[in-house]
Amino acid sequence: MKKLFFLILITVSIFMGVIQSHASDTELFTTQARPNILILLDDSNSMDEDFYGNGVGSFSSNSKSVHGKKALRDIIDQFKSKLRFGLMAYKVSGVSSYLIHNSPYFVSYEPKSYCPNPPPECVTYAQTGNAGAKATCETECKKDNPSFDAAYLDEIITNYGVGSEQRNRYSNLVYPHTQRMKNPKDTSNYIYYKHAYPMYSGSNWGTSFCYSTAYNPNESTPWDSYSCYKTKTGTNDDYPTGYSEFWFNSTFIPTDTDYALGYQDFGRRLQWYYVGKTWFSNSSPGDGYLHVAVDNLLDKNGDPTATYTTLWNKLDPKENDETGYMSCGAGDKNTCSYVINAGLTPTAGTLETSTKYFKGVGGYTSPIEAWCQKNFIIYVTDGLPSVDESGTPKSADTLMPTVLTKIDNLRNISTTIKGKSYNFDVKTYVTTFRTSFTQKMVTTSLTRSFEALYIMMP
């Protein structure tokens, strides 16, 4: 309900703002134009995740995709007589049917790596080696786990020098291990990790435990090679203790969430378990795709228009319906009757496509019909960009300045109405799911031109 509440709050504030801004204008009574609302929906593969990053599949009732689409359906239904709605999402390409697994990164089987409630000093120690921070980290963590050893750091942390960007980043990403789950092959022991994210493959890889014997703690290419086994028992992190039933050797490359978060390495030890089917692409054309042009949702008789029907179908969450979610047979998955999730996150490129749409350039017809019409974007996303406007993967820190500039540019666009040019202020409302990385978007954008920014809560 919190997700729906925040979207309603945004939509009500839009509607009330329109009324207030024209309360003294006589033109309000001669030129009445319903506000235009362009929903910009994140349809990247990271929407396969739940609110904590676990790979659950886009059809799961726990997925960000299902929660977001259901909330949006409620909004358009509630305001269908007052606002004009349309839908844009990231353009997808190279999409195939894949299988999704949930995969903890940088795993350990050692209880001494586990601290469920670490103080901030733990990350400070990992980043700086400060003795005082180490002492505080160890004292606080031992309250929950007496066997905790603060000095048990992942190799990628100690590989990079104090003060380096990589050491600071991976200290935040992987230290200490705050989560645990029972080892499905040894239920008397646990698998310890800080974060788990989706892993995609062309076949069902079941449950697996992987170890890189020639692990290189330098991130990025060449990607590490792993030996994967069906069974791992015990609490020893050393190889080959506890590993049995060898399965295959493989390398793994980052996907959408990995690029956005800053993972270009997965650690010496990996684990995963099978979840279900999904759509997948590990690329992006870099721009947006207009699924539904902004228009009235009801006709003059109060009956639903074709726009309403198409928009409703596009936002079908396919909740707990794996077969339905995988039923699209279109070669171009942008043209499915419902929005599928696949590919990376081209935030800047999609905002640029939105700008072209409101301007009515680049082959688009602007939805703006009157000089006094108000225009808004409601951007529903799970966080940060992962590719630039050409589809090239880059870190979120590198991409965010361009994203914010695109939002700034939307505040002053021009288009022609009945032969005369007018300027319009298209306000962007960013609605994000609360995950471990959306705080970066919050703190980066608070001083910029967002009309509002809300956090969608799990």
Image (cartoon, rainbow, N blue to C red):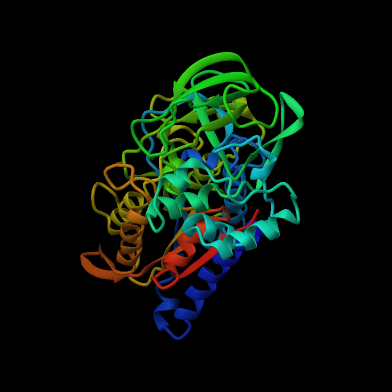
Looking at this view, is 109 or 181 the one in front? 109
- Toward the bottom, the furthest residue is 24
Q: Is residue 259 above or below residue 109?
A: below
Kindly indicate the quadrant of the structure image that contains residue 113: top right
Image spot of residue 361 (x, y percent)? 24, 53
Q: Is residue 310 above or below residue 249?
A: below
Q: Is residue 379 above or below residue 238?
A: below
Residue beneath the point at 65% across and 39% down: 192
Kindly indicate the quadrant of the structure image that contains residue 343: top left
Q: Is residue 287 visible?
A: yes
Residue beneath the point at 58% across and 49% down: 151
Image spot of residue 394 (x, y percent)? 33, 46
Please state, as top left, top right, bottom left or bottom right, where the N terminus lies in the image: bottom right
Kindly indicate the quadrant of the structure image that contains residue 49: top right
Q: Is residue 11 visible?
A: no
Q: Is residue 426 left or right of residue 85?
A: left
How many callouts does the rendering have? 0
Image spot of residue 35 (x, y percent)? 45, 65
Looking at this view, is 71 or 372 the one in front? 71
- Toward the right, the furthest residue is 188
Image spot of residue 174 (x, y percent)? 54, 47
Looking at this view, is 156 or 427 the one in front? 156
